[in-house]
Image: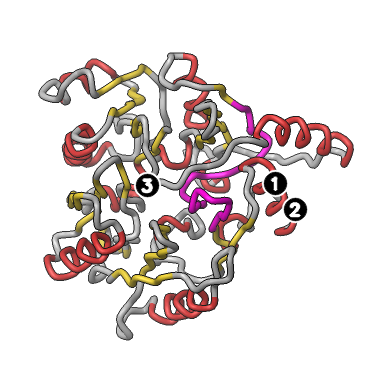
Amino acid sequence: MKKLQFYFVLPSAFTTFVIMKKQSDRTASFRMPAEWEHQRAVMLTWPHEGTDWRPYLDDIQSTCVKMVEAIARFEDVIIAAEHPDEVRALLSHIDEGKVNIYPVTNDDTWARDHGPITLIDSESSERLLLDFRFNGWGNKFSADNDNLLTRRLFDEGAFEGEIIDNNDFVLEGGSIETDGQGTLFTTAQCLLAPNRNQPLSQMEIEGELKRRLNMERIVWLHHGNPIGDDTDGHIDTTVRLAPNDTLLYVSCTPDDEQYDDFRLLEDELKSLRTADRRRYRLLSLPSPKPIYFDGERLPATYANFLVVNGAVIVPTYNQPDSDSEAMRVIGEAFPDREIVGIDATVIIRQHGSIHCMTMQIY
C-alpha cells in the first residue's frame, strides 16, 4: 500500500499571525463541548471490500450494524459509505429517519480521526466544523480520501453549520479529550510523533491547539501507550474525561508487560490538578487479558467507549469478569446513563475500538 507523502512547510511569522488571528476572531465565542453534552448525531464511516477489513468483512459489518442499532436508540446516525445501497440493505430494519447515509469514497473507517471536530456557540447555537488534516497517523497508511471525507460529507449536506479549513495542521480526534470548560488533554507521544506537525515544538503546537480550539489550558500526558497501538498513543485508548472532574484511566496487573508504563500514567494523573487547583476524581479501568491476532498483541482497552445522549457504549472482549467490571466503573462515572456493551473483538483486529470508529456531531 503506497504511503501518503506529507510535507509541512512552516509559513513566515507574519503569515502565521494573519491566519491565526483570522481563525481566532471567528472562534472567539465558540468552545469545544465535552462528549457528554447533547449531541445531534454520531458519524460512522462504513467498512467495505476495498479496505483492510476485507478478510473478515462480514464480521466487521455485523459489528457496525450492532453499533448503529445501539446509537440509533438515542440519536441520529450519519454514515459515510462507499456503497450506500449495500449499507441501506444491512440497516433496513432500523427507522430510516434515524440513519442518514451519504455516498463518499473512503480509505478506512476511523471516523474519530478523519471526521470534523465541532465547536459550538452556547448563546447563538451556531456550530463550526473544524476540518483538520488527516495523514494516516504520521504517513503510516494511505489517507487521501479520508482526508477529504469531512469536506465531501459537508458538500453532501450531512452537517449543519460552517466548515472551517484547518488542513494546514495535522490533528486526529482520538488524540484529544476536553472537559468542555477550556481544558484539553492530549499525549506528548502522539502530537510530538514524527510526520505530524514538524518542525513545530511542543510549545508551538500547544499554541495552535489553544487558538484553533479556543482552549485555555493544555494538559500533556507522557505515559500509557498500549502495545499494538499504531496511533502513537491516542488518549482515547488510555484516559477519558467524565463529568465532575472525573478521569477514567487504564490500569494493568503486575504480570502484564505494560504494567510499568501504566503505573507511571497513574502516578502522573495523581499529580494533576483542575483549572481551579483541585484533585481529579480518578476511576481505574481494568485491562482485558491479552488478546492476540496473527501472533500480534492487540490494543484492547475499555477506555475506548462512546458517550451518546442517554447512554455510554462500551467495548467488550468476551471476558466476563473484566467486561462487567469495566461497565460497572464506567457506570459509576456516568450514573445517569444506560451502559451498553458491544463486542469489539473484531474491531481491535485493526487496532482500534468503538470510540475510534465514531465521531459525535453537535
Q: Which residues are magenta?
A: 164-185
Q: Is residue 180 magenta?
A: yes
Q: Which mark is residue 172?
A: none
Q: Position of residue 276 (x, y in %)?
A: 58, 66
The answer to whether 358 appears left or right of 28 in the picture is left
Sequence-first tag of 3 and 2: 3
User: Alpha-carbon neighbours of circle 2 within 10 Å: few (<14), some, or many (≥20)?
Assistant: few
In this picture, is 51 found above or below 350? above
C-alpha span from label 2 to label 1: 6 Å
113 horizontally vs 212: left or right: left
Residue located beneath label 2 in the image: 204
Q: Residue furthest bottom?
A: 254
Point 39% across, 37% down: residue? 360
Spot occupied by residue 160 in the image (x, y as percentages of width and height):
46, 21
Q: Mark 1 and 3 residues: CB-CB less than 8 Å, in contact? A: no
Q: Amino acid at mark 3?
A: Trp
Q: Nearer the viewer, mark 3 or mark 2?
A: 3
Side (left or right) of 50 relative to 136: left
Quarter of the image for residue 163 reads: top right
Q: Specify the amino acid type for callout 2.
A: Glu
Task: Give percent across and percent down for residue 98.
Answer: 23, 23
Q: Which residue is mark 3?
A: 36
How much space separates mark 1 and mark 3, taking CA atoms? 25 Å
Image side of residue 104 versus residue 124, left or right: left
Give the amino acid at mark 1: Glu
Please give the residue where the numbered disc 1 appears in the rendered image.
208
Q: Position of residue 210 (x, y in %)?
A: 67, 48
Secondary structure category for the residue under label 1: helix
